[in-house]
Amino acid sequence: MKIDLFSYHNDWPHEFLREATVLKEKLYHISPVIEHIGSTSVKDLAAKPIIDIMIGVKNEEELDQVVDNLMGRDYIYLSIYNKQLPFRRFFIGIKEGVSSTIPNELHEDNFFEIPHTNRHSHIHVVPTSSNWWEDHLLFRDFLRVSEHDRKNYELLKRRLASNNWENMNEYAQAKGEFIHSILEKARKR
């Protein structure tokens, strides 16, 4: 799998806001906190044109309420990752016209990789008290203010994108050491 990176696009924050509005309507009863994360949330950083969204809930008991309210035509629930990250629920937002061909839930028995060209968003649902929540905001906020580290991260991403990956998780893991070093810097500020 090749990773297609695009130069930063000014529409990405607007796409996030449109999606966040839809998500707030679907989840109004739990009053979630919704944040734009990932590379599309950092001005002047190249990214896959898939909006990363983090939904914060008060506690883990609310995770399955989110599943009940989001899983369906527009959002594919990847329960296959629940064992690996039991405190997170992960969804892929599917582009219009694609969803009828994909099951509402992907698990061990029916999993397949949904092409990036069919995705408009990745949605991560976690408790706001989790390290996962804090680390993603810390990483985003640090890259927003550190031009030097933002440029180095983009260079790494472009180099890695030229490789052929088995799946997205391999690509994400290859960035792990750099991400860890940024989090260490950010915690010292």
Image: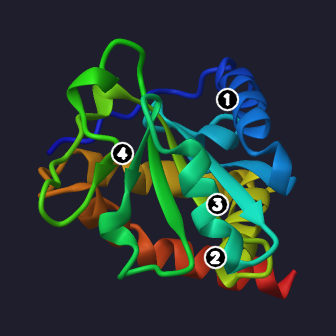
Which type of secondary structure does the marked residue at label 2 adopt? helix
The answer, for residue 151, to whether it is visible in the render is no
Q: Is residue 143 left or right of residue 76?
A: right
| Mark number, residue 19 | 1
Choose mark 3 or mark 1, whichever is in front: 3
Q: Position of residue 9 (x, y in %)?
A: 61, 21
Residue sitting nearer the eye, 45 or 12 = 12
Distance from Cα at disc 4 to Cα at disc 3: 38 Å
State which tag comes first along the sequence, 3 or 1: 1
| CA gap, disc 2 and disc 4 | 25 Å
Query: Residue 184: image x %, image y %?
Result: 68, 85
Question: Upstream in the sequence, badge 3 or badge 2?
Answer: 3
Q: Which residue is mark 3?
A: 65
Residue drawn 61% across the image and 46% down it: 69
Kind of residue at disc 2: Trp
Look at discs 2 and 4 and give the one toward the viewer.
2
Say which residue appears at 83% left-offset and 43% top-offset: 28
Element type at marker 4? helix
12 and 17: which one is in front?
17
Which residue, given by chain and number where applicable, does mark 2 sit on?
Answer: 132
Of badges 3 and 2, nearer the viewer stands 3
Can you tell which quarter of the image residue 180 is in?
A: bottom right
The mark that comes first in sequence, 4 or 1, is 1
Secondary structure category for the residue under label 1: helix
Left or right of residue 188: residue 108: left
Residues at circles 3 and 2 in contact by the CB criterion of under 8 Å: no
Which amino acid, mark 1? Glu
Q: Quadrant of the N terminus?
A: top left
Identified at 37% across, 81% down, the residue is 84
Image position, residue 120 (x, y; %): 47, 29
